[in-house]
Amino acid sequence: MPEQWTSETAHRRAPAATQEDVARELGISRTLVSLALRDRPGVSASMRQRILETADRLGYRRNSLAAELAQRQRTAVGLHLLDAHNDVYTTILSSVQAVIAPAGRRLVLAVNSRSGRDDPQPRNTLLEANVGVIISATSVAPDDEVRALNRILPVVLVARRVEGVDSVYVDHDVGARAAVEHLAGLGHTRIAHLTGPSFEGHTQRRAGYLEAMRSLGLTPEIATNPGFAREEAFGAARALLDRPASERPTAVFTHNDELALAVREAAADLGLRVPEDLSVVGFDNSRAAGLTGVDLTTVDIRGDELGRAAAEAAIRRLEHPGVPPLQRGFTPSLVVRRSTAPPRGV
């Protein structure tokens, strides 16, 4: 005889409470609930107690199989990328994977929005995935937030340096000075810099530009764009160039290759030729920079080496949690192609 439907069977068959239910009840993030239930750092004692009591009251039961899988997952490596559309980051992804896969580690990927703002969702995704370490190839989070995250879960920074955190970094200011000195050596004096939002992890390139301009006795000019993507920068690039020939810059050094491509497009829209009317230097040495017809002079950050070094640092951190933070620097180099030439009349 089939079981009769009663309030008792309804209660018995009701789906178990989830971490989302606990988070909703307390008005907090699921990440915080997950950290508390797994007894991980980053949650105060009082909040942990509230979470545990609420979970018990709602009938949350941790699935033993899920717990076992989560424990296994802690050997996985998380990779946080700023922008999957910029091929510098795909180069880093490929080189990280080339080290992680042979080591028998699983890679979990999370990608930032392209808004040019700090986006916590990818970090939360990796925390909830229960990875053992995060490789962060994004520079938008403030240094203090990076250190706070590192106290919860080990972090390896790519192309950025923060004291006390594993960092595989680039001397961005050295690269910026090389770019400006190259342009000045060609005879340019009106050298502008097109950059993006002023995050702590992005200021070295601007600082290197300013230092080089002042040491050469030249007047700096900085134009700021809301983001770092090519399609966002066309308007700012056009405004920088849309002036009488005697006033506009004869050369532009940009924060990255994406912005350099936007400068080329804006120049073409205004009838200016590169490099005859305008010299352009990018930063990163992306794959796009070397394409025929682009031939962009740019600063090579050695993205492939950065990715490999970051992956090796992540495995080192997983296997030897107590070792001191790694601080490994790479010196960038200028790659001269066909987007730079002496200004007219020189």
Image (cartoon, grey):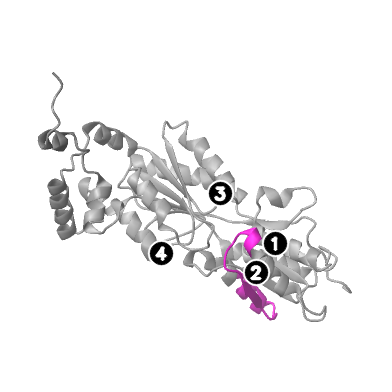
Distance in Å between CA atoms under marks 2 and 4 = 24 Å
Q: What residue did someone put label 4 on?
A: 143
Q: What residue did someone put label 2 on?
A: 194
Distance in Å between CA atoms under marks 3 and 4 = 23 Å
Q: Amino acid at mark 4?
A: Asp
Residue at 46 percent across and 59 percent down: it is 161
Q: Earlier in the sequence, mark 3 or mark 4?
A: 3
**Number of callouts in the render?**
4
Residue 217 lies in the magenta-colored region: yes
Q: Amino acid at mark 2?
A: Leu
Residue 75 lies in the magenta-colored region: no
Distance in Å between CA atoms under marks 2 and 1 = 10 Å
- Residue 168 point in image, percent of width and height: 48, 52
Q: Earlier in the sequence, mark 2 or mark 4?
A: 4
Q: Residues within 10 Å of mark 3 (few under 14, many from 20)?
A: some
* Near-viewer residue (118 or 319): 118
Residue 84 badge: 3
Q: Earlier in the sequence, mark 4 or mark 1?
A: 4
| Magenta stretch bounds | 208-232
Residue 328 badge: none
Local SS, label 2: strand
Local SS, label 1: helix
Distance in Å between CA atoms under marks 3 and 2 = 22 Å
